Image (spheres, rainbow, N blue to C red):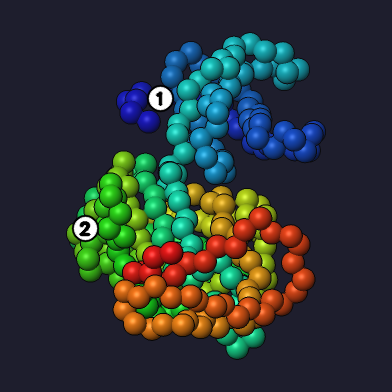
Amino acid sequence: YGYADLLDLPTITYCKNLQDEDIDYSYIARINMTGTWLLGTTAVSLKVKNPMETPAINFWGFCIMTRALSPLQCESRVYGFNIAVVENITLTAYNRGYTVSKEAAINRVEMGFELTTYIPGSEDYYNEIIITAPEGFRFPAICRFYSPGTGNEGTTSLPELTECAGDGSTTLTLTLPAMRPLYNSTRYEVRFRVINPEEAFSDVDTSDHWWSITTRKNYIDDDEDDVDVDQTRNIPSFPIYPRVAFVQVDTQSQVGLNSTTIRFLLETQASLAPQSNITIYPPPGFVF
């Protein structure tokens, strides 16, 4: 704690939260002691589960009471600490259709983010970024179309030799080369491939559809536990839509730079409500 002469606390008989008194009081801890509390500096340690992000009102409260719970000394404005999170996260998906039988919906996604904690390079561990998708999405083991950067203005790429590995399920791991740091207050962007789920959804900001991202120190020595550094678990997803059952493009002219009329043949999978517009995305080079 940085103090040379800490006094011993009285004997602690129990330490627990107050959810037995009220289920909403699980965030309050009560420590019961017996014996004389001497004048001077003391310290107490206890475990607590952090919230997902820094509270808007970030103060702790302490109150020393008698056995009858009469206050003796209290302080309600003890400044807390900030929660280490990944900030300013964006998800840009280029295919929002769902997977149908025998035809996977391969989706190229760009993720942008900024870290709050600088992680230096080290000989003892590799720096990693862990991206976790909601249930139903799938990261193939082979990272085709992966890129450590997007080239967008104002963004930074991960090191060129950063390795990408999917687990065949919902987790993608990006491992930086040895001795390469991760910088805070830096706008990173990466591009990766994910297989979309088989069900459509539009409620993107619910716990069932949240993405998460974690930075981690992955120690080379198996006897050392890996250490999570920054983490954000409540990233809203992008919506997944039903796909058009059949699309065919016909043209009256295939000559380069000629103006032509294009016809699209469409087969929908279900009746659709009246729509305000239809959006068509051509390959690069075409001009409407």
Q: Which of 268 and 72 is in front in this view?
A: 268
Is residue 196 in view from this perspective?
yes
Instruction: Write the residue at 30% across / 54% down.
Output: 152
**Left or right position of 270 against 50:** right
Q: Is residue 220 visible?
A: no
Q: Determine the secondary structure under disc 1.
A: loop
Q: Is mark 2 on a helix, strand or loop?
A: loop
Q: Is residue 99 above or below residue 121?
A: below
Which residue does the numbered mark 2 point to in the structure image?
180
Considering only vertical position in the picture, is 205 above or below 54? Answer: below
Quarter in which the N terminus is drawn: top left
In this view, the mark in front (1 or 2): 2
Q: In which quarter of the image is the C terminus?
A: bottom left
On the image, numbered disc 1 is attached to which residue? 6
Q: Please state which of residues 63 and 283 is positioned toward the viewer in this rendering.
A: 283
Residue in the image at 39% along x and 53% along y? 112
Q: Report how far apart the C-alphas of labels 1 and 2 lie in the structure.
A: 40 Å
Q: Extreme bottom residue here?
A: 102
Where does residue 93 sit, x and y in percent of width and height? 48, 62
Residue 40, by quadrant, is top left
